[in-house]
Amino acid sequence: MARLAPKVLNLNESDRSELQQLINRHNAAQQLVLRAKIILLASEAHILHLYVQPQVM
């Protein structure tokens, strides 16, 4: 089975800031906050993937 490469998700600083502000709002809808968290984690995972190479056994 072919392994698909993850999509590259590049966020600039203003996008990150806007998502973080949305997460920190107390009156934001839970579903929207969850989506913002997923987007931030996906962009951070891409950054981490650049630095950490998986071990192949």
Image: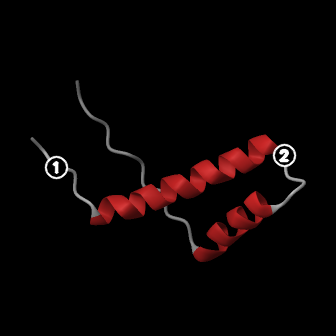
Q: Disc 1, disc 2: CB below 8 Å?
A: no
Q: Which residue is drawn at 90% across and 54% down?
A: 27
Q: How crowded is mark 2: few (under 14 residues within 10 Å), some or many (20 or more)?
A: few
Image coordinates for residue 20, horizontal then vertical, percent = 69, 65
Q: Disc 2 residue type?
A: Ala
Q: Which residue is drawn at 9% across and 41% down?
A: 57
Return the residue at label 2.
29
Q: Disc 1 and disc 2: Cα gap in Å?
A: 39 Å
Q: How is the image coloured?
A: secondary structure
Q: How crowded is mark 1: few (under 14 residues within 10 Å), some or many (20 or more)?
A: few
**Extreme residue in the top direction:** 1
Mark closer to the chain start, 1 or 2 = 2
17 vs 47, left or right, is right
Q: Helix or strand or loop: what does disc 1 sit on?
A: loop
Residue 38: numbered disc: none
31 vs 43, left or right, is right
Image coordinates for residue 45, horizontal then vertical, percent = 43, 56
Quarter of image, res 12? bottom right
Q: Helix or strand or loop: what does disc 2 sit on?
A: loop
**Extreme residue in the bottom direction:** 13
- Name the image quarter holding the N terminus: top left
Q: Which residue is drawn at 31% across and 63% down?
A: 50
Q: Which residue is drawn at 16% across and 49% down?
A: 55
10 vs 47, left or right, is right
Foreground of the two, 57 or 19: 57
Image coordinates for residue 13, horizontal then vertical, percent = 60, 75
**Extreme residue in the right direction:** 27
Return the residue at label 1.
55
Image coordinates for residue 9, horizontal then vertical, percent = 48, 57
For the image shown, how many numbered marks are present on the structure?
2
Q: Disc 1 residue type?
A: Gln
For residue 7, above or below residue 14: above
